[in-house]
Image (cartoon, grey):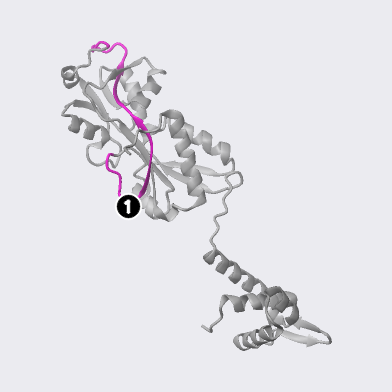
């Protein structure tokens, strides 16, 4: 390709729009001889006179007229490369945002996110997806399909950006008329009880709750498994099963159904929720705004996590 730098393109665009060597020199802060030299070079590069004299005026050739829009677009592209600007306004954007989240957050966390999202971005679209959708959350972030992932794994992927959101305690949820009376869920009672567990589709390993139990040395006998968390409370109402879950989840359903919360029988570290995102969107103004929406929703539900100095 011929050597045509940004300054030469800018000179070409000004000549095309002003049809005057002197006016171009004035606007660009150059001398007329310098612009005349640039015009000669442009004529060589394009193989066209570009400007022809008609009496006291200069007129564009037919080929020069076709160059105005392409040159303008080229200059705009160069400007975006050298001085990128992420012009984002949540009030007017029609962008689609995708967040991947586990289904046990849907009843208390997702509504808070949706409320804040549409209060600020009424024309935008929000899609909540399963953690295993589109080949998994890590792949979704890397390929740009996902904007954010919300989770509470003890060891999140170290190649992603991470921000803590809030902490939550482990508790046990059971029906009000459960044979284990209030305050009597000891380690022995927990071990003897029949337990309910949720195993989501495509899930691998023992899950977050299973990992916590393994770390505490506490065993449970799982006699019933479900594919979705939101079914669990309704099964508990009709059975003598015990469900180990987070306080936020248990509190929500204990206020709706004849269920009660019992303390987890052994000391356990709180579970920490956080949001993950890929470096490809780290500096995006739209992504920064979305992360702020999620953080505000988390702060409204639970206190800020206590982080080590």
Residue 174 location, quadrant: top left
Give residue 222's position: percent from left, percent from top.
20, 27
Q: Nearer the viewer, residue 300 or 196?
A: 300
Q: Residue at 54%, 49% (x, y): give it.
A: 95
In the orientation shown, which residue stands out farthest toward the front?
309
Q: Is residue 114 visible?
A: yes
Identify the residue at image location x=43%, y=33%. Answer: 298
Q: Which residue is mark 1?
A: 159
Is residue 307 one of those drawn in magenta? no
Q: Is residue 131 above or below residue 74?
A: above
Percent from the top left, x then y, of residue 167?
Answer: 35, 32
Q: Is label 1 in a helix, a strand or a loop? A: loop
Residue 110 can be seen, yes or no: no
Residue at image coords 22%, 35%? 211
| Position above or below: 151 against 220 | below
Measured along the vertical axis of the image, is residue 143 above or below residue 275? below
Nearest to the observer: residue 77 or residue 118: 77
Residue 103 in percent (x, y) is at 37, 35
Assess disc 1: are there few (<14), some (14-19) or many (≥20) residues with their C-alpha within 10 Å of its C-alpha.
few
Region in magenta: 154-182
């Amino acid at each position: 390709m011929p050597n045509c730098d940004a300054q030469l393109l800018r000179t070409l665009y000004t000549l095309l729009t002003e049809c005057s060597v002197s006016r171009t020199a004035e606007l660009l802060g150059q001398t007329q001889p310098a612009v005349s030299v640039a015009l000669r070079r442009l004529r060589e590069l394009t193989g066209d006179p570009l400007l022809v004299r008609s009496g006291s005026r200069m007129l564009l050739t037919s080929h020069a007229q076709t160059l105005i829009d392409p040159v303008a677009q080229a200059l705009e592209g160069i400007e975006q490369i050298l001085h990128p600007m992420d012009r984002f306004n949540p009030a007017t954007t029609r962008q689609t945002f995708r967040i991947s989240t586990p289904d046990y957050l849907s009843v208390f966390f997702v509504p808070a996110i949706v409320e804040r999202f549409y209060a600020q971005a009424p024309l935008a679209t929000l899609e909540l997806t399963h953690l295993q959708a589109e080949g998994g959350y890590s792949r979704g972030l890397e390929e740009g399909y996902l904007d954010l992932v919300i989770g509470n794994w003890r060891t999140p992927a170290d190649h992603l950006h991470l921000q803590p959101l809030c902490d939550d305690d482990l508790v046990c949820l059971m029906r009000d008329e459960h044979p284990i009376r209030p305050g009597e869920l000891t380690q022995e009672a927990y071990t003897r009880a029949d337990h309910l567990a949720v195993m989501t589709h495509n899930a691998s390993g023992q899950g977050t709750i299973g990992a916590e139990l393994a770390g505490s040395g506490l065993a449970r006998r799982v006699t019933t498994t479900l594919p979705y968390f939101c079914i669990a409370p309704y099964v508990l109402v009709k059975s003598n099963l015990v469900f180990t879950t987070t306080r936020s989840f248990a509190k929500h359903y204990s206020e709706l159904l004849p269920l009660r919360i019992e303390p987890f029988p052994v000391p356990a570290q709180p579970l920490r929720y956080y949001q993950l995102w890929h470096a490809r969107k780290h500096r995006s103004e739209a992504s920064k705004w979305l992360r702020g929406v999620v953080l505000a929703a988390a702060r409204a539900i639970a206190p800020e996590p206590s982080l080590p100095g």
